[in-house]
Structures are given as structure tokens and as C-alpha cells.
Image (cartoon, helix red, strand yellow):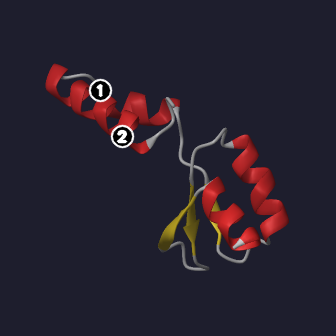
Amino acid sequence: MKSSVLYVLKELLVALEEGVDVAAIASASPAIIVPETLDPINLLGVLRRARGSFVIVTNEFGVVQGLVTPLDVLEAHCG
């Protein structure tokens, strides 16, 4: 899966070694950030648009609280 964390890290490391502008790579696939107050139904919609990737969860002050994947939501609903 091209949107996995390992794929992105690999691409960034290769870019750094080759002297490529990392900011250009980062702006090509911006992070998806959601508030921790987002309800699970709307979170599913956001995850669907993220195409199987993960989203970053922040609190009301913008501090990162963690990551959520589609599997996390499935496990929370189904046990």
C-alpha cells in the first residue's frame, strides 16, 4: 500500500539522500488531521477519504494525541 507509514518514510529517506526538496514531497500528500471530539460515524467518512491510510488526532489545542487507522475503528466497534 503506497500510503503506508513505511512507504512514506522510505521515500523521505531516499529524497534526503538525493538532496531533493522534502517540503515538496510533504506538500504533495498533506496530513489529514481530525479533532479528538469527532464522532465515529464522521471519522469513518474521513478515513474513507484517506484511502486506507491513517489520520492524525489532535486535542482542542492542536496537540497530537495519536493516530487512528480504519482497523482501530473496526476493533472499537466489533471488539
| Disc on res. 5 | none
Which residue is tagged 2? 6
Q: Say what secondary structure mark 2 lies in.
A: helix
- Image location (x, y in percent) of residue 39: 79, 72
Q: Given the image, on which type of amino acid does mark 1 rest? A: Asp
Q: Residue at x 75, y 69 (%)?
A: 78
Question: Looking at the picture, does residue 11 appear above or below residue 38?
Answer: above
At 29% from the left and 33% from the top, the residue drawn is 10
Tell me where residue 30 appears, x and y as whole percent: 54, 41
Residue at the image position 47 percent from the left and 40 percent from the top: 4
Q: Position of residue 33 (x, y in %)?
A: 60, 58
The x and y percentages for residue 59 are 58, 78
Give the image quarter of residue 19: top left
Residue lying at the far front of the rendered structure: 79
Q: CA distance from mark 1 to mark 2?
A: 19 Å
Picture quarter containing residue 52?
top right
Residue neighbourhood size for the residue with mark 1, other residues' Cα within 10 Å, grouped as few (<14), some (14–19), many (≥20): few
Q: Secondary structure at mark 1?
A: loop
> Which residue is found at the position 38% from the left and 34% from the top?
7
The answer to whether the residues at label 1 and label 2 have Cβ atoms under 8 Å apart is no
| Quadrant assignment, res 76 | bottom right
Left/right placement of residue 19 relative to residue 69 reads left
Query: For mark 2, does the 10 Å Cα neighbourhood hold few (<14), some (14 to 19), or many (20 or more) residues?
Result: few
| Dot in front, 1 or 2 | 2
Q: Is residue 55 above or below residue 7?
A: below
N-terminal-most mark, 1 or 2: 2
- The C terminus lies in which quarter of the figure? bottom right
Q: Nearer the viewer, residue 22 or 47?
A: 47
User: Mark 1 sits on what residue?
Assistant: 21
What type is the residue that disc 2 sits on?
Leu
